[in-house]
Image (cartoon, rainbow, N blue to C red):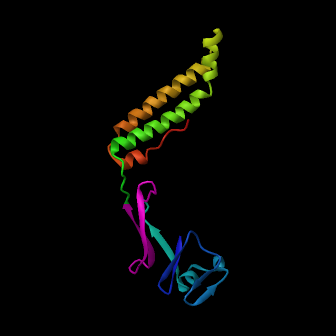
Amino acid sequence: MKAVNNAGVITFYQSLPNSFRSSTGLHLNVKGWTDQDIKDNGLFDVIIDDSYDERIHDLGEIYWDTEATCFRKDISNKTFSKSLSELKEQAITNFKHRIGGELAKTDWYIIREMDNGADVPANIVDARVALRELSETVESEINALTTKAKVITYDFPNI
């Protein structure tokens, strides 16, 4: 990420732009410039702490760090209105809905068995059991978490 201070207005770029305007004018073909050319024309790195996670952090305003000769955006922890138990309940409910969607794909086997006694293939039974076990495991893991940030950043397994 790069930024330039143009007469007190900091313009932020996700990557090195093809062109940009600074207090010295319009600059073209920037991607062909050397690192020194880029700095000489006022375009500098934007540093954001490596621990930044948009799920649990907010970014502060961009500012110039004179000592490091770069722009910075500080992070702060987000405030969540829901309680820890509410966040856990929401995460568990959402995952159970995903599990339910997967189970629904094979419900017709179960209905067919109830309707006419046709056997459900063993691989389908095993897959359904595995889904329910996975749901129980995820629920236990989430309930064991002790902070809102840990619940929000919990990495759900792929189904």
Extreme residue toward the bottom, this view: 24
Residue 97: percent from left, percent from top: 51, 35
Residue 17 occupies which quadrant of the picture? bottom right
All told, the count of numbered labels is: 0
Residue 149: percent from left, percent from top: 38, 50
Residue 72 is at least partly visible in this image: yes
Vertical comparison of 5 with 92: above or below = below
Residue 58 occupies which quadrant of the picture? bottom left
Horizontally, residue 15 falls left or right of residue 137, namely: right
Residue 64: percent from left, percent from top: 42, 78
Give the residue at x 45% y 36%.
Answer: 93
**For the magenta stretch, what is the residue range?**
52-76
Give the residue at x 52% y 26%.
Answer: 130
Q: Main secondary structure of the magenta part?
A: strand
Vertical comparison of 6 with 118: above or below = below
Give the residue at x 52% y 22%.
Answer: 129
Vertical comparison of 95 with 49: above or below = above
